Image (tube, rainbow, N blue to C red):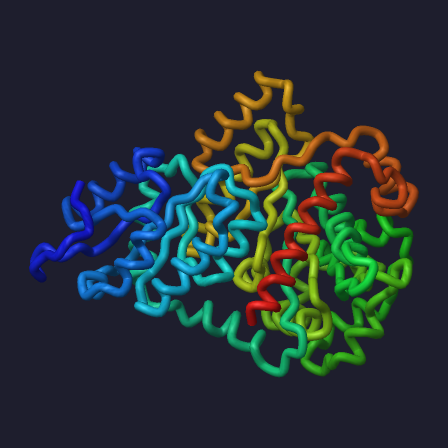
Amino acid sequence: MTSASPQDDKNAILACTISRDVQNFDLLIEDMEAALGERWGDLGFAEALAFFSQPDADSLEFVALAIDGEDEDNLSLMGEIITRAKEKKIKIVLIAEDVTPASLHQLLRKGADEFVPYPLPEGELQEAIARMNQPEPVAVQQATAPLAQGESKEGALFVVHGLAGGVGSTTMAVNLAWELATVSDKDAPSVCLLDLDLQFGTVSTYLDLPRRETVFEMLSDTSSMDDDVFSQALQMYEEKLQVLTAPSDMVPLDLITPEDIQRVIETARRNFDYVIVDMPSTLVHWSETVLQAAHVYFAMIELDMRSAQNALRLKRALQAEELPFNKLRFALNRAPKFTDLNGKSRVKRMGESLGISIDLQLPDGGKPVMQSGDHGQPLANAAAKNPLRREIAKLAKSLHSLGSSDAEAA
């Protein structure tokens, strides 16, 4: 393994790992050697900032920023490394182990180009390098460019997608939206919850809201939709949360096009600080639009064979179409308790066998969770001390504090 020292052009350093101690990431060392031979080096965090100012850094094509849970106290330093690398037009691959979704979201927002979980799935680093070397796809530019036009808030988009029936995606979406809406007593953010499960969406049931014909009318003609039309389709819950329910009648999932979804997302983000989307479990032709626009895309699973098989199918489908699989944050519902060592071992084996990182483990909230859905109340109102509610509240606070710090930095 070489260090980052002066080289002639033929042997110039093409990439560097940046970590607290690269020996903690032995699989990364192997993959870097397989991809680059001797033409890479390793740096510590402070060394990296100094190295970017040296002429030798001009030959760098990318850096692999490798972090684990112990590095979360130094996110500002990580962010500075990413910023300096972007100034030098150096690509960044984020390698992360046991890091919270909020921290990953912050670093990806700073400008990291790729995310690969650690332990590294076989061939994942090489695929990330190949994607970074490709020009930006036109489809991505078309999907994201309109979001910057005429926005007043540029709200964050959080998506929840259940990979199997009954894994708790609507429970997660409803309660995350409510916790964000009530995260602050003084300056509460504006939050919009969109139920895009057009056929079997149950957000209206969870919050005891009627389904309205105006939703179908709006979705049927988004080309003439403006802020007023959109607001008329929303319903207010407890004076704090705006909700777009699924249509009153069962409609085909292809009722709306990718362009329709794009307009709805643009309008929602323009008017709200946070937009939460509850997706259908089925992949449809506008799923890519939501994935491309999402800041965080929670893929809900359980510790069972159904979830494992569907997670693998989804991974293959996204990678086959060269879609950003790295945006997915796998959330395990009804996760084993801390003292359940056998269950914890099963979770680890599941992640390793699928080549995914299970970033969020949500505890089993038991019977109160089911009852809250039937009673039309968020868990915060129905069972405030429930362990699932506490975990979702903690996630909401971390996401909101992250958004606040980003706004202050801007």
Residue appearing at x 9%, y 55% in the figure: 11
Of 93 and 212, nearer the camera is 93
Q: Position of residue 107 (x, y in %)?
A: 48, 55
| Image: 247 above or below 119 | below
Q: Is residue 385 left or right of residue 122?
A: right
Quarter of image, res 211: bottom right
Left/right of residue 71 with respect to residue 159 in the rendered view: left
Q: Quadrant of the C terminus?
A: bottom right
Q: Which residue is nearer to you in this view: 164 or 194? A: 194
Residue 54, how many percent across, how many down?
22, 64
x 51%, y 75%: residue: 145
Q: Is residue 342 left or right of residue 199?
A: left
Could you say which is closer to the camera, residue 373 or residue 391? 391
Please determine whether, in this image, residue 358 is positioned above or below residue 150: above
The percent coordinates of residue 193 (x first, y second) are 75, 59
The image quadrant where one finds the N terminus is top left
The answer to whether 226 appears left or right of 5 in the picture is: right
- At horizontal 21% and vertical 65% (from top left) the residue drawn is 58
Expressed as whole percent of the image width and height from the top left, the position of residue 255 reads: 69, 65
Marker count (numbered): 0
